[in-house]
Image (tube, rainbow, N blue to C red):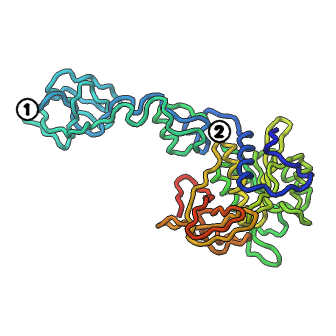
């Protein structure tokens, strides 16, 4: 067990909150150490996985010169006598005599001896069947290796496999890809006060995390089935332990919501102690959402499981997702620590003392500046629904208009774009 990613066990003494940047690095390292083994799958079966090795073609791309137009492959000066036809998918006999031509289709192999390709729409046939015209000065074919050379890495390890990568792999002549499958995740939502239908009232609130957290997890590359979401789990220690045991039998990552403090119905810490877990991170110096945690369990067979404790307040739970769960899942998939792009603040953002402040912002589509959004209380989701990510305000600092700061983007599915 790596000592640099573990602190006190859940039953041990309290520890100071971990610096936000260090917490991200610790959980990413823990995830990489527990990455599932590499599998070799046909490209079409690898959608949603992550490349475990760089993708490179087995031949030059294209492997032979190919025509980029429909027309005539000609040798020597005009006029040209037609001696054949070359279609895509067939070998091309060489042109050996000046004054000859073959009709050629787009994508077909260019015959050896070709001096130029005359576009079909710029050609003329004479009465006796000869072809005339003036070829354009630039070659009308693609050269071998024009797109890539054999063995050249086109996509690095750690890249998510999507239809674009699948198509590229097939065009490279690859029959299998070395990949890591998506980690399986589950969600347990704690809280007797939660409703799963109807309007809130009479002291009870509508659960917002059960419907939404699985979508975030999928965007970070995890697999979550409907049966892996349990809402609600009763506010008793026995119910917490039983739910965790059942979820950990199937999932490599179990996210919980609520119960991360030490109040009268906060049973997560005692439940983790009963299960023999140890903390990777226990509370993070970030606002909102500091009472977040990541714990690790090692089963008798050596398999590693993780429990990510998210606060019960909805926005705080999302802060925990971007702070701990995103780096963990990146590590488990063999990806690098998620990159934080830089943005320019359009307005002031307050600091949070000794804590990192993750402030919801919307990116202006015109100038790219980051505008703080309203309605950003820990229990609110209105601001989150209109935001593109969190501006990172370091401890002991405040954001001023014009400051350049890091941004934690909210996760996107392939094909999605920032607003």
- Residue closer to the observer: 85 or 353: 353
Residue 23 pos. (x, y %): 74, 52
Is tag 1's residue or tag 2's residue first in the polypeptide sequence?
A: 1
- As displayed, is residue 345 above or below residue 269? below
Residue 336 pos. (x, y %): 63, 44
Q: Residue 128: which disc? A: 1
- 196 relative to 144 in the view: left or right: right
- Residue at the image point whose x is 63% and y is 53% from the top: 219
Residue 99 pos. (x, y %): 14, 27
Q: Residue 69: which disc? A: none
SS of the residue under disc 2 = strand
Q: Which residue is mark 2?
A: 180
- 149 relative to 68 in the view: left or right: right
Q: Residues within 10 Å of mark 1 (few under 14, many from 20)?
A: few
- Residue at the image point whose x is 78% and y is 53% from the top: 308
Report the quarter where the N terminus lies.
top right
């Amino acid at each position: 067990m790596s000592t640099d990613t573990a602190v006190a066990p859940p039953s041990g003494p309290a520890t100071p909150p971990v610096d936000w940047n260090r917490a991200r690095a610790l959980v990413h390292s823990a995830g990489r150490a527990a990455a599932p083994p590499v599998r070799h799958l046909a490209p079409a079966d690898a959608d949603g996985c992550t490349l475990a090795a760089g993708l490179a073609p087995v031949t030059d791309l294209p492997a032979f010169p190919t025509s980029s137009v429909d027309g005539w492959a000609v040798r020597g000066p005009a006029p040209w006598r037609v001696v054949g036809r070359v279609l895509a998918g067939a070998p091309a006999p060489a042109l050996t005599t000046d004054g000859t031509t073959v009709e050629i289709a787009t994508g077909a192999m260019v015959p050896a001896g070709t001096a130029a390709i005359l576009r079909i729409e710029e050609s003329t046939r004479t009465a006796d069947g000869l072809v005339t015209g003036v070829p354009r000065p630039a070659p009308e074919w693609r050269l071998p290796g024009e797109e890539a050379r054999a063995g050249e890495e086109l996509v690095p390890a750690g890249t998510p496999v999507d239809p674009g990568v699948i198509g590229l792999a097939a065009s490279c002549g690859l029959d299998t890809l070395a990949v890591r499958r998506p980690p399986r995740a589950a969600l347990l939502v704690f809280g007797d006060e939660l409703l799963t239908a109807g309007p809130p009232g009479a002291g009870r609130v509508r659960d917002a995390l059960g419907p939404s957290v699985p979508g975030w997890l999928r965007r970070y590359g995890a697999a979550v089935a409907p049966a892996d979401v349990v809402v609600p789990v009763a506010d008793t220690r026995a119910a917490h332990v039983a739910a965790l045991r059942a979820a950990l039998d199937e999932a490599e990552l179990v996210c919980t919501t609520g119960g991360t403090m030490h109040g009268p119905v906060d049973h997560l810490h005692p439940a983790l102690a009963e299960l023999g877990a140890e903390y990777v991170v226990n509370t993070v110096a970030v606002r909102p959402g500091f009472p977040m945690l990541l714990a690790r369990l090692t089963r008798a067979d050596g398999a590693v499981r993780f429990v990510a404790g998210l606060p019960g307040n909805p926005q705080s739970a999302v802060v925990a997702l971007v702070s701990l769960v995103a780096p963990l899942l990146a590590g488990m998939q063999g990806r690098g620590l998620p990159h934080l792009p830089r943005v320019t603040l359009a307005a002031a953002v307050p600091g949070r003392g000794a804590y990192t402040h993750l402030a919801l912002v919307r990116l202006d589509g015109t100038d790219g500046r980051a505008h703080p959004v309203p309605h950003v209380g820990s229990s609110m989701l209105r601001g989150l629904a209109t935001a593109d990510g969190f501006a990172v305000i370091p401890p002991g600092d405040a954001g001023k208009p014009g400051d350049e700061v890091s941004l934690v983007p909210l996760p996107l599915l392939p094909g999605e774009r920032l607003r």
